[in-house]
Image (cartoon, rainbow, N blue to C red):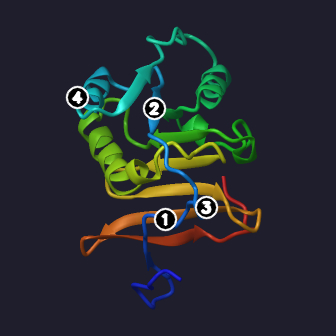
Amino acid sequence: MPKKIDQSQDEWFEHTEDLWRQPKELRSRLKLLADENVPQSLIVELKSARISVKTAAETNLCGLSDEKIFDYAKKTGMVLLSLDADFWSDRRFPLQQGGGVIWLNVDDNDVQGALRAFGLIYGTFAKSFGGNWSRGLKARACPDRFFLKMISSAGCKVIYELRLKRRCLVAREAIPSGQSFP
Protein backbone atom coordinates (compact mmCIF):
# COMPACT_ATOMS: atom_id res chain seq x y z
CA MET A 1 0.00 0.00 0.00
CA PRO A 2 1.43 3.42 -0.95
CA LYS A 3 2.43 5.70 1.93
CA LYS A 4 -0.12 8.47 2.54
CA ILE A 5 1.38 11.96 2.60
CA ASP A 6 -1.57 14.08 3.68
CA GLN A 7 -4.50 13.12 5.88
CA SER A 8 -6.73 15.94 4.63
CA GLN A 9 -9.80 15.44 2.44
CA ASP A 10 -7.50 15.24 -0.60
CA GLU A 11 -5.72 11.96 0.13
CA TRP A 12 -2.28 12.36 -1.42
CA PHE A 13 -0.01 9.32 -1.50
CA GLU A 14 3.59 8.86 -2.53
CA HIS A 15 4.05 7.64 -6.08
CA THR A 16 6.26 4.59 -6.53
CA GLU A 17 7.84 3.60 -9.81
CA ASP A 18 5.81 0.40 -10.18
CA LEU A 19 2.45 1.73 -8.98
CA TRP A 20 0.64 1.50 -12.35
CA ARG A 21 2.47 -1.44 -13.87
CA GLN A 22 1.34 -5.02 -13.67
CA PRO A 23 3.51 -7.40 -11.62
CA LYS A 24 6.45 -8.73 -13.70
CA GLU A 25 5.50 -6.40 -16.58
CA LEU A 26 8.55 -5.69 -18.71
CA ARG A 27 9.48 -2.09 -19.33
CA SER A 28 9.87 -1.04 -22.91
CA ARG A 29 11.41 2.21 -24.11
CA LEU A 30 9.06 5.16 -24.62
CA LYS A 31 8.62 6.02 -28.30
CA LEU A 32 6.79 9.23 -29.17
CA LEU A 33 4.89 10.33 -32.25
CA ALA A 34 4.74 14.14 -32.26
CA ASP A 35 1.56 15.58 -33.73
CA GLU A 36 1.85 18.43 -36.26
CA ASN A 37 1.14 21.05 -33.59
CA VAL A 38 4.15 20.17 -31.42
CA PRO A 39 6.68 23.03 -31.81
CA GLN A 40 9.82 22.13 -33.74
CA SER A 41 11.97 23.59 -30.95
CA LEU A 42 10.44 21.07 -28.52
CA ILE A 43 11.18 18.23 -30.98
CA VAL A 44 14.81 19.40 -31.21
CA GLU A 45 15.09 19.42 -27.39
CA LEU A 46 13.60 15.91 -27.12
CA LYS A 47 15.92 14.51 -29.77
CA SER A 48 18.96 16.18 -28.18
CA ALA A 49 17.96 14.48 -24.89
CA ARG A 50 17.99 11.15 -26.79
CA ILE A 51 14.24 10.63 -26.41
CA SER A 52 12.82 8.55 -29.23
CA VAL A 53 10.47 10.85 -31.17
CA LYS A 54 9.21 10.83 -34.74
CA THR A 55 7.24 13.74 -36.15
CA ALA A 56 4.06 13.65 -38.21
CA ALA A 57 6.12 15.01 -41.11
CA GLU A 58 8.74 12.24 -40.79
CA THR A 59 6.00 9.60 -40.92
CA ASN A 60 3.99 11.24 -43.75
CA LEU A 61 1.01 11.94 -41.47
CA CYS A 62 0.73 15.69 -42.05
CA GLY A 63 -2.80 16.79 -42.86
CA LEU A 64 -4.41 13.51 -41.78
CA SER A 65 -7.30 13.35 -39.34
CA ASP A 66 -6.72 13.02 -35.60
CA GLU A 67 -8.23 9.52 -35.77
CA LYS A 68 -5.71 8.38 -38.40
CA ILE A 69 -2.79 9.84 -36.45
CA PHE A 70 -4.03 8.20 -33.24
CA ASP A 71 -4.48 4.84 -35.03
CA TYR A 72 -0.98 5.05 -36.52
CA ALA A 73 0.55 5.72 -33.09
CA LYS A 74 -1.41 2.82 -31.59
CA LYS A 75 -0.47 0.37 -34.39
CA THR A 76 3.21 1.26 -34.17
CA GLY A 77 3.35 1.16 -30.35
CA MET A 78 4.09 4.87 -30.08
CA VAL A 79 2.68 7.34 -27.58
CA LEU A 80 1.07 10.31 -29.27
CA LEU A 81 2.45 13.67 -28.11
CA SER A 82 0.13 16.59 -28.90
CA LEU A 83 -1.03 20.05 -27.92
CA ASP A 84 -4.53 19.09 -29.14
CA ALA A 85 -7.08 18.76 -26.31
CA ASP A 86 -9.29 16.59 -28.55
CA PHE A 87 -7.13 13.56 -27.71
CA TRP A 88 -8.25 13.79 -24.06
CA SER A 89 -11.81 12.97 -25.17
CA ASP A 90 -12.85 9.39 -24.47
CA ARG A 91 -15.77 9.71 -26.84
CA ARG A 92 -13.45 10.20 -29.83
CA PHE A 93 -10.50 8.21 -28.49
CA PRO A 94 -11.76 5.60 -26.00
CA LEU A 95 -9.37 4.40 -23.32
CA GLN A 96 -10.53 0.82 -23.71
CA GLN A 97 -9.34 0.76 -27.34
CA GLY A 98 -5.76 1.16 -26.14
CA GLY A 99 -3.10 3.54 -27.31
CA GLY A 100 -1.35 6.22 -25.32
CA VAL A 101 -1.52 10.00 -25.40
CA ILE A 102 0.46 12.78 -23.75
CA TRP A 103 -1.46 16.02 -24.15
CA LEU A 104 0.67 19.06 -23.35
CA ASN A 105 -1.96 21.35 -21.84
CA VAL A 106 -0.28 24.67 -22.69
CA ASP A 107 -0.87 27.47 -25.19
CA ASP A 108 0.36 26.66 -28.69
CA ASN A 109 3.00 29.41 -28.51
CA ASP A 110 4.25 28.54 -25.01
CA VAL A 111 7.34 26.50 -25.84
CA GLN A 112 8.84 26.97 -22.35
CA GLY A 113 5.58 25.79 -20.77
CA ALA A 114 5.53 22.77 -23.10
CA LEU A 115 9.12 21.95 -22.14
CA ARG A 116 8.30 22.22 -18.41
CA ALA A 117 5.13 20.12 -18.80
CA PHE A 118 6.91 17.41 -20.77
CA GLY A 119 9.95 17.50 -18.47
CA LEU A 120 7.78 16.98 -15.41
CA ILE A 121 5.84 14.02 -16.78
CA TYR A 122 8.84 12.45 -18.49
CA GLY A 123 11.26 12.84 -15.61
CA THR A 124 8.88 11.64 -12.90
CA PHE A 125 6.72 9.09 -14.69
CA ALA A 126 6.99 8.40 -18.44
CA LYS A 127 10.70 7.57 -18.49
CA SER A 128 10.31 4.79 -15.90
CA PHE A 129 6.90 3.67 -17.18
CA GLY A 130 8.34 3.40 -20.67
CA GLY A 131 6.25 2.35 -23.64
CA ASN A 132 3.65 0.39 -21.67
CA TRP A 133 0.81 2.70 -22.68
CA SER A 134 -0.91 0.18 -24.93
CA ARG A 135 -3.58 -0.60 -22.32
CA GLY A 136 -4.94 2.89 -22.90
CA LEU A 137 -3.36 5.58 -20.80
CA LYS A 138 -3.81 9.29 -21.34
CA ALA A 139 -1.79 12.02 -19.72
CA ARG A 140 -2.65 15.71 -19.48
CA ALA A 141 0.64 17.46 -18.73
CA CYS A 142 0.71 20.98 -17.30
CA PRO A 143 3.88 22.83 -16.26
CA ASP A 144 3.23 22.24 -12.53
CA ARG A 145 1.29 18.92 -12.45
CA PHE A 146 -0.06 16.18 -14.65
CA PHE A 147 -3.09 13.95 -14.76
CA LEU A 148 -3.26 10.28 -15.71
CA LYS A 149 -6.50 8.87 -17.06
CA MET A 150 -6.75 5.08 -17.15
CA ILE A 151 -8.88 2.03 -16.59
CA SER A 152 -8.50 0.78 -13.01
CA SER A 153 -7.94 -2.87 -12.10
CA ALA A 154 -11.68 -2.95 -11.29
CA GLY A 155 -12.48 -1.93 -14.87
CA CYS A 156 -13.58 1.67 -14.09
CA LYS A 157 -12.17 4.86 -15.58
CA VAL A 158 -10.16 6.89 -13.11
CA ILE A 159 -8.07 10.08 -13.16
CA TYR A 160 -5.10 10.70 -10.90
CA GLU A 161 -3.44 14.05 -10.33
CA LEU A 162 0.32 13.95 -9.76
CA ARG A 163 2.65 16.73 -8.66
CA LEU A 164 5.94 17.29 -6.93
CA LYS A 165 5.59 17.94 -3.22
CA ARG A 166 8.57 18.22 -0.90
CA ARG A 167 10.90 16.68 -3.52
CA CYS A 168 8.83 13.57 -4.14
CA LEU A 169 6.08 12.74 -6.58
CA VAL A 170 2.68 12.46 -4.93
CA ALA A 171 -0.65 11.43 -6.39
CA ARG A 172 -4.30 11.54 -5.51
CA GLU A 173 -7.42 10.27 -7.15
CA ALA A 174 -8.76 13.39 -8.88
CA ILE A 175 -11.98 11.74 -10.00
CA PRO A 176 -12.86 8.54 -8.14
CA SER A 177 -13.53 5.27 -9.92
CA GLY A 178 -17.01 5.00 -11.31
CA GLN A 179 -17.73 8.74 -11.41
CA SER A 180 -18.07 10.43 -14.77
CA PHE A 181 -15.55 12.84 -16.21
CA PRO A 182 -14.97 14.51 -19.54
Say whether residue 83 is visible: no
Q: Earlier in the sequence, mark 4 or mark 3?
A: 3
Quarter holding residue 112: top left
In the rendered view, would you say 180 is above or below 33?
Answer: below
Single out the mark in the foreground, 1 or 2: 1
- The reply, left or right, for residue 117 in relation to residue 15 is left
User: Which residue position holds label 2?
Assistant: 32
Quarter holding residue 92: top right
Amino acid type, callout 4: Ser
Using the image as rendered, state which of residue 166 and residue 29 is in the foreground: 29
Does dot 4 land on a helix, a strand or a loop? helix
Amino acid type, callout 1: Asp
Say whether residue 94 is visible: yes
Q: Mark 2 to mark 3: distance in Å? A: 22 Å
User: Which residue position holds label 3?
Assistant: 22
Does dot 1 land on a helix, a strand or a loop? loop
In the rendered view, would you say 12 is above or below 119?
Answer: below
**Residue visible at 53% across and 56% down in the picture:** 148
**Residue visible at 43% across and 70% down in the picture:** 15
Single out the mark in the foreground, 4 or 3: 3
Decide: marks 4, 3 in contact (CB < 8 A)? Answer: no
**Disc sitting over residue 18 in the figure:** 1
Q: Mark 3 to mark 1: distance in Å? A: 8 Å
Position of residue 131 measured from the top left corner of the image (x, y, whole percent): 51, 42
Does dot 2 land on a helix, a strand or a loop? strand
For label 1, the crowd category at 10 Å Cα-Cα, with few meaning under 14, some 14 to 19 and many 20 or more, is few
Amino acid type, callout 3: Gln
- The reply, left or right, for residue 84 in relation to residue 152 is left
Position of residue 146 measured from the top left corner of the image (x, y, whole percent): 43, 56
User: Which residue position holds label 4?
Assistant: 48
